[in-house]
Amino acid sequence: MLKLIDNLPNHVVGIRATGEITRGDMETVLLPAINELAAREGAINYLLVLDTGVQNFTLAA
């Protein structure tokens, strides 16, 4: 699961990864947040907190 991290500066998108990470998580959480940030700021400042092992990322993710 991917969740946005609150209370970060406006020029940063933060994502916390827990449990299994699927393609759906990427499409519904990560990509919209990154696209919105890039459109607004012209650059991507991204924080990813892994509270899960990389083995929990599905192949499609």
Image (tube, rainbow, N blue to C red):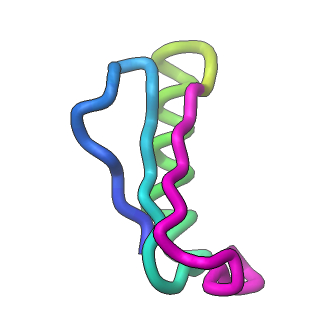
Image quarter in which the N terminus is found: bottom left
Q: Quadrant of residue 8?
A: top left
Left or right: 46 with respect to 19?
A: right
Of residue 50 and residue 21, the one placed in the foreground of this image is: 50
Relative horizontal placement of residue 7, taking residue 45 as reference (left or right): left
Name which residue lies at 62% across and 85% down: 56
Compared to residue 18, the image places residue 35 above or below, namely: above
Counting from the top left corner in percent of width and height, residue 30 is at: 51, 54
**Quadrant of image for the C terminus:** bottom right
Q: Position of residue 17 (x, y in %)?
A: 47, 66
Q: Is residue 59 magenta?
A: yes
Q: Which residues are magenta?
A: 45-61
Look at the image and say whether residue 22 sits in the magenta stretch: no
Against 22, residue 14 (above or below) is: above
| Above or below, comparing residue 6 to residue 45 in the picture | below
Residue positioned 51% across, 14% down in the render:
41
Please state the total of marks drawn on the protein image. Answer: 0
Residue 58 lies in quadrant: bottom right
Q: Residue at image x 23%, y 33%?
A: 7
Residue 48 x, y percent position in the rendering: 54, 49
In this view, which residue lies farthest toward the right? Answer: 59
Decide which of 45, 23 is in the foreground and name it: 45
Of all residues, the one furthest to the left in this rendering is 7
Q: Residue at x 57, y 80 (%)?
A: 22
Q: Name the one closer to the observer, 27 or 2.
A: 2
- The image shows residue 59 at horizontal and vertical percentages of 76, 84
Q: Is residue 60 above or below residue 32?
A: below
